[in-house]
Image (cartoon, grey):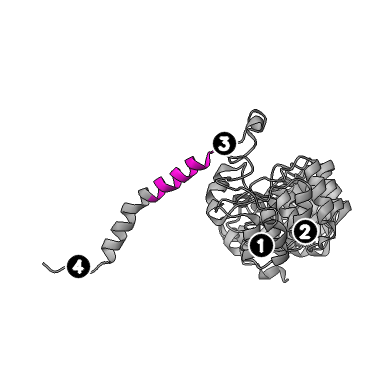
Amino acid sequence: MDPDSHPASSQHISKIGPPDILIDAEENIQGIVAASERGDLDAVQARFATCKSALSRIGKNEPASEEGDLTPLHVALERAVERNHTHIVLYLLDQGISIYANDFVLAAQKRSFVMLKLFIEHGWDINHPMGWREGPPLTLALNDEPLLRWFLAHGADPNTTIFEEDDFTVLSLAVAHGSFATIKILFERGGGDVHRGQLLHCAVGRGAMGPPGARNVASTKAVPRSMTEDECLPVIDYLLSKGANVDGIKYQNDAKTFFQHQAFGLGTPLHVAAEVGNLTAVEHLLIRGADPNVKNTRGQLAYERAEYFGHLAIVKVLRALKGDVAEKIGPYSGHIGHKPDEAQHSGAIFIPPSTSSRLLVFANLALFPVMLWIMSTRSPSVPT
């Protein structure tokens, strides 16, 4: 890219003052960008010294309105990162040039550990998202063990949320698409939390489903290459050994998300396995104690979900186990969440199904006058 092609220079330089300073500053900024691009530290330092007072008012920690709206001096930092000129990056950061998410991402993609450390030392949060509906750069390391271990050693958190409204974390992404070795590293080195991120639901859909609730994944760089189902059962067993609830209703520990999504039919990992057609996972969950008589939030059994999606082999297995399911919502009758005896330890919110039903009724009643008003405004007037 031509250093003169960035429109940011003129719009920021116009704030400086007299024309002589404007010309001097613009000329030196372009010189700094070009010198940064070719890795000439002496030239960069000389340009800074020439008009230091003017440059101190351009681009130094000045926020941009958008990720692509770069301040003039940040363009120099961007070029230095692109070309892996670590000495230039260090000098520019010491001058107070702002860091953007894309700088850190680019350094991670280049596996420049020195540059990544420089960014952290200059105040960058390693768990900062790469963009809207994108996870932190840790997601880039899920198929790169040395980079993964480096991130975790420098504070990366695998429990960081990617899709907040769907309780989908970096660890969720690894469980859904990563290797078993990666998942174990995230637990052992990163403090993975088995009670966050709907991990068992992700595990049973390995290789057959995308991120839960993600209608549009903002960037493929946040999603590693999908793995096969070969490691599905070891991952399920590993999560169960860490304390995952084999009959846990999706979002049962997050009341807000639960109420937002319950109308779509939130079920257990067995429901998910039945929906995606993973017969091996269905049979394994049953062996591990999964209850086929648990209904989802729309009152459906797992075999009914399999039947809806046309997975007849799973229907046959589950229908043979169908028992008394009268009014049984979730794994524990009368509660959405943990077992009653786990209340004092979990901090989960217990909401009886009857209460949630009343809340939905009240919500509909509250909206009824509004609906009548809308209908009245659209109806033709009656002549008098």
Q: Which mark is residue 381?
A: 4
Label 1: which secondary element: helix
* Residue type at tag 2: His
Residue indicated by mark 2: 177
Q: Residue at x 82, y 46 (%)?
A: 238
The relative height of residue 35 versus residue 104 in the rendered view (above or below) is below
In terms of secondary structure, what is the magenta stretch mainly?
helix
What is the CA distance from the residue labelled 3 to the residue labelled 4?
49 Å
Question: Label 3 crowding class (10 Å Cα cut-off): few <14, some 14-19, many 20+?
Answer: some
- Location of residue 320 by image quarter: bottom right
Where residue 218 appears, as percent x and y from the top left, is 65, 62
Disc 3 + disc 2, Cβ < 8 Å: no
Which of the two discs, 3 and 4, labels the residue nearer the N terminus? 3
Left or right of residue 38: residue 374: left
> Which residue lies under the disc numbered 3?
350
Amino acid type shown at disc 3: Phe
Q: Nearer the viewer, mark 3 or mark 4?
A: 3
Q: Nearer the viewer, residue 145 or 66?
A: 145
